Amino acid sequence: IPTLPASISFTGGASTFAVGSLSAPQTAQGWQRIYDFGGGAGSNNIMVGRYGNSANLYYEGWKGGSGDQTYTTTNSIVNGYDTLYEAVQQGGAAGSLSAVAHYLAGTSQADNGTVGSSKTWVPASIVRTSNYIGRSNWAADNYFSGTMSEILLYNTAFNTTQRVILENYLS
């Protein structure tokens, strides 16, 4: 993926939509990424993927070298089945914590986060030069195992109407 320019601001929020299916091996492999955009491992990353070895999905924003994950707590991943995963982060000042809502096929998901709530850092407006789909910026993490048909990332927090319109388009 080419460099993401510093002119992209996430202070108005972030909305991500990913349609895909995890496949063999059926055993969970830790930290598979759907995407990971940043400046390397632990450097202003924005990422979505499998939460550890669990069947949960997560969205995470980093402030410099500090990250706070938000994740579903509802076993969102069913291997071999297409899934529409959505995360909508509210806006705020770059480097501040803001709330994230998780959805699976349009249905709100129970969630949590490493700071005790479903919040993560609002990404800074910086040049991101290490940008991957299906791969992590961390060498120890596993590659995505499955298929992806669509990945969309917007620099605004979608409202319900906007989300439903996009869900209908992606279904």
Image (cartoon, rainbow, N blue to C red):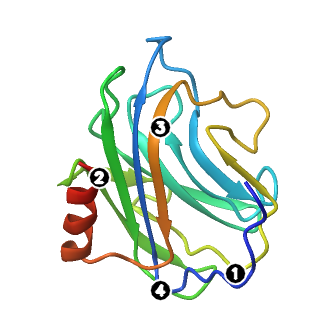
What residue would you read off at disc 3? 148
Give the Cα distance between marks 1 and 2: 28 Å
| x and y, in percent, of residue 63 in the image | 68, 70
Note whether 159 is above or below 105 in the view shown. below
Q: Can you tell which of label 1 and label 2 is closer to the viewer?
A: 2
Give the Cα distance between marks 4 and 2: 23 Å
Kindly indicate the quadrant of the structure image that contains residue 23: top left
Give the Cα distance between marks 4 and 1: 12 Å
Give the Cα distance between marks 4 and 3: 27 Å
| x and y, in percent, of residue 39 in the image | 81, 60
Q: Nearer the viewer, residue 171 or 40?
A: 171
Q: 57 left or right of 76? A: right
**Is there a contact, CB below 8 Å, between mark 4 and mark 3?**
no
Sooner in the amino-acid sequence: mark 4 or mark 1: 4
Q: Helix, strand, or loop for circle 1? A: loop
What residue would you read off at disc 1? 125
What residue would you read off at disc 4? 12
Residue type, mark 3 in image: Met
What residue would you read off at disc 2? 170
Q: 15 left or right of 76? A: right
What's the residue at 54%, 24% (across, down)?
Answer: 145
Q: Quadrant of the N terminus?
A: bottom right
Sooner in the amino-acid sequence: mark 3 or mark 2: 3
